[in-house]
Amino acid sequence: MRDLSSSIHSWDEWHKRGGGACIGAEYQVAKMPISYIARADEVDETRGFMKAVVGAESRQVLGCAILGLEGGELMAMIEIAMLGKIPYTTLRDAVFAHPTLSESLNNLFSTFEE
């Protein structure tokens, strides 16, 4: 099985070395442990993390890795946002049902690394 966390990390390093010039200027990284998700806590499955790369100017999601409870389901939501070129702020500010995994997108896109 391929390690998705190394894939997004490799992209990070590639961009820092100058390879990202072809996709635009700067980017931001949001990362959050799965343990911050209320639904994951309720079903006692808090292992893993979420990590997303967002264009600083475009505000569009450029990539994402989710290792944890129903990561594929959350990735489908992210993929739809990417296909529709929806800014991350839409996911950050949306009102999702509680308690669901989807509401974790509010928290993820509120936590950017400096």
Image (tube, grey):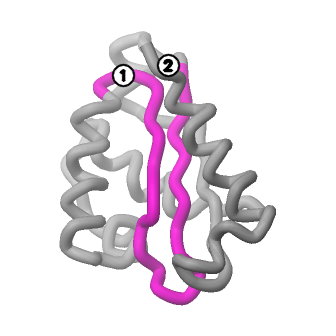
Task: Mark 1 and mark 2 in contact? Answer it, CB < 8 Å.
Answer: yes
| Horizontal side, residue 11 vs residue 40: left or right | right
Question: In terms of sequence position, does the residue under pointer 1 or pointer 2 come before the other?
Answer: 2
Whole-percent x and y of residue 50?
51, 40
- What kind of element bears circle 2? loop
The answer to whether 81 is drawn above or below residue 107 in the figure is: below
> Label 2 neighbourhood size at 10 Å, few (<14), some (14-19), many (20+)?
some
Q: Quarter of the image containing the N terminus?
A: top left
Q: Which of labels 1 and 2 is toward the front?
A: 1
- Residue 100, numbered circle: none
In magenta segment, residue 27: no
Vertical arrangement, residue 88 with respect to residue 51, above or below: below
Which quarter of the figure has residue 43?
top left
Which residue is found at the position 44% from the left and 21% from the top?
41
Q: Which residue is mark 1?
A: 69
Residue 13 vs 57, above or below: the answer is above
**Where does the image place residue 6, in percent across and percent down from the top left?**
62, 32
- Residue shown at 56%/78% (left/top)? 22
- Magenta region, residue range: 48-70
The answer to whether residue 51 is magenta is yes
How far across and how far down the image is residue 56, in percent?
59, 81
Could you tell me the amino acid type at mark 2?
Thr
Task: Name the residue carrying label 2.
Answer: 46
Q: Is residue 52 left or right of residue 84?
A: right
Tell me the quarter of the image containing the C terminus. Answer: bottom right
Q: Where's residue 52, x and y in %?
A: 52, 54
The answer for how far apart the CA atoms under marks 1 and 2 are is 7 Å
